């Protein structure tokens, strides 16, 4: 018994010391190695101007989540277009390692790699909900990894706008002839389609759009939808507002420099990706909420805005051009063919369910 008492005393002392070392005075868990205490500061370049609503809010949400979830071991520094001066240079920033992270739209750099355009949105294709399912469970993320890995980049979904409006036009579009010679800001594959039917597409950063439309540099533009369009003032210059066809589920992207990513501990890699996805889904909700509010404001305060839908012959011509261009691209590029097939096959599968679920439900209100 006399030998047991000192032994118990030693055990209790060791347990008390271990508790103090692990939890400290405030009962908060602490890490056990020097490496775990290391802080990683990551620089993020975004396409958007400082304090840009919704899109810029997504990067702020990401920063908040990543820093909180990592207990401060991740620090995110965000540089807007105002600082880095290159709204459409995010791909190069991240590829070169000048920035560790980026936030932008994948189709902005289709000139550098044509296959990047497939990960924002495609005309006459999947909605946001359908495309999210493709990314997560239909092979979309794996294909995005395949495209970006050769550039030393990892890409993750960065926030969806939902179905975008077809754009603001100074004149009414009644036939396909009305699009010929039309100077329009419209990026991505939709720009290729517009060129195929005779329009003159271009891409202009957000901060320059109103001036370009007002001064006649362009005759029309598409941006997002009521969530952002109304505050940009496009209705003051172009009264015709057309419904969408070209971006039924536009997804922004977070970019990560792979070399930097591979220096992070596994738990911080997981936190980084999780924070990106959470902020992406938050942006989708934010965008839908803002569009609903601004749509109501637009109908109430700006009754002179003429909301239109392209006539069926115009849609038919655009769809025909879309199908032809996709066929041509698939013949030229094996990876394009693989992605096009993946998107097409998944759309056929999931649209059958969308039609019997969401579409049937919405039709019940007609």
Image (cartoon, grey):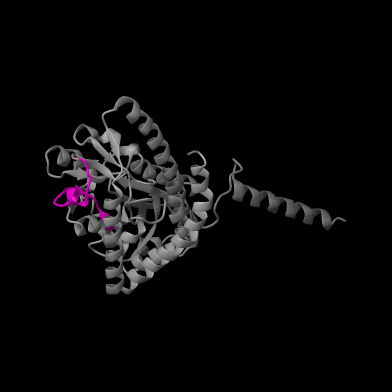
Does 349 lie within the magenta span?
Answer: no
Q: Quadrant of residue 260?
A: bottom left
Does 189 lie within the magenta span?
Answer: yes
Judge whether 311 appears above or below 99 on screen: above
Q: Is residue 333 left or right of residue 196?
A: right
* Magenta residues, start to end: 172-190
Q: Is residue 307 left or right of residue 236?
A: right
Q: Is residue 216 at all visible to an observer of this figure?
A: yes
Find residue 229 and report its horizontal and vertical position in percent. 29, 38
Find residue 209 and report its horizontal and vertical position in percent. 20, 42
Position of the N terminus, as image quadrant, is bottom right
Along the viewing direction, whichever of 192 and 171 lies nearer the viewer: 171
Judge whether 273 appears above or below 336 on screen: above
Q: Is residue 51 at all visible to an observer of this figure?
A: no
Along the viewing direction, whichever of 295 and 35 lies nearer the viewer: 295
Q: Residue at x 36, y 32 (%)?
A: 294
Q: Is residue 292 left or right of residue 46?
A: right
Q: Quadrant of residue 139?
A: bottom left
Find residue 345 and report its horizontal and vertical position in percent. 44, 65
Judge whether 65 appears above or below 150 on screen: above
């Amino acid at each position: 018994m006399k030998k047991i008492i000192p032994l118990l005393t030693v055990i209790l002392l060791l347990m008390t010391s271990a508790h103090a070392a692990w939890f400290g005075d405030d009962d908060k868990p602490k890490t056990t190695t020097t490496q775990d205490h290391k802080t990683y500061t990551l620089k993020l370049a975004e396409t958007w101007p400082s304090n840009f609503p919704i899109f810029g809010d997504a990067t702020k949400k990401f920063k908040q989540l990543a820093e909180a979830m990592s207990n401060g071991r991740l620090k995110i520094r965000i540089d807007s277009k105002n600082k880095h001066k290159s709204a459409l240079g995010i791909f190069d920033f991240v590829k070169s390692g000048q920035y560790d992270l980026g936030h932008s739209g994948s189709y902005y750099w289709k000139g550098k790699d044509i296959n990047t355009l497939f990960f924002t949105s495609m005309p006459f294709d999947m909605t946001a909900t359908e495309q999210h399912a493709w990314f997560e469970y239909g092979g979309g993320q794996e294909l995005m990894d395949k495209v970006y890995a050769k550039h030393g980049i990892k890409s993750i979904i960065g926030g969806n706008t939902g179905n975008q409006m077809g754009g603001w036009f100074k004149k009414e579009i009644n036939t396909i002839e009305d699009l010929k010679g039309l100077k329009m800001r419209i990026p991505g594959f939709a720009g290729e389609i517009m060129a195929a039917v005779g329009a003159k597409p271009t891409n202009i950063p957000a901060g320059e759009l109103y001036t370009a439309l007002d001064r006649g540099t362009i005759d029309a533009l598409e941006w997002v939808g009521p969530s952002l369009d109304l505050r940009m003032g496009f209705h003051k210059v172009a009264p015709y507002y057309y419904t969408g066809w070209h971006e039924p589920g536009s997804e922004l992207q977070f970019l990560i420099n792979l070399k930097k990513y591979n220096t992070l501990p596994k738990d911080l890699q997981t936190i980084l990706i999780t924070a990106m996805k959470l902020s992406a889904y938050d942006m989708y909700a934010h965008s839908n909420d803002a569009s609903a509010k601004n749509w109501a404001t637009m109908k109430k305060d700006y009754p002179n805005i003429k909301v239109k839908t392209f006539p069926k012959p115009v849609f038919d011509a655009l769809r025909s051009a879309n199908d032809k261009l996709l066929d041509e691209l698939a013949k030229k590029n094996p990876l394009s063919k693989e992605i096009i097939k993946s998107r097409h096959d998944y759309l056929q599968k999931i649209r059958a369910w969308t039609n019997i679920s969401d579409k049937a439900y919405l039709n019940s209100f007609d």
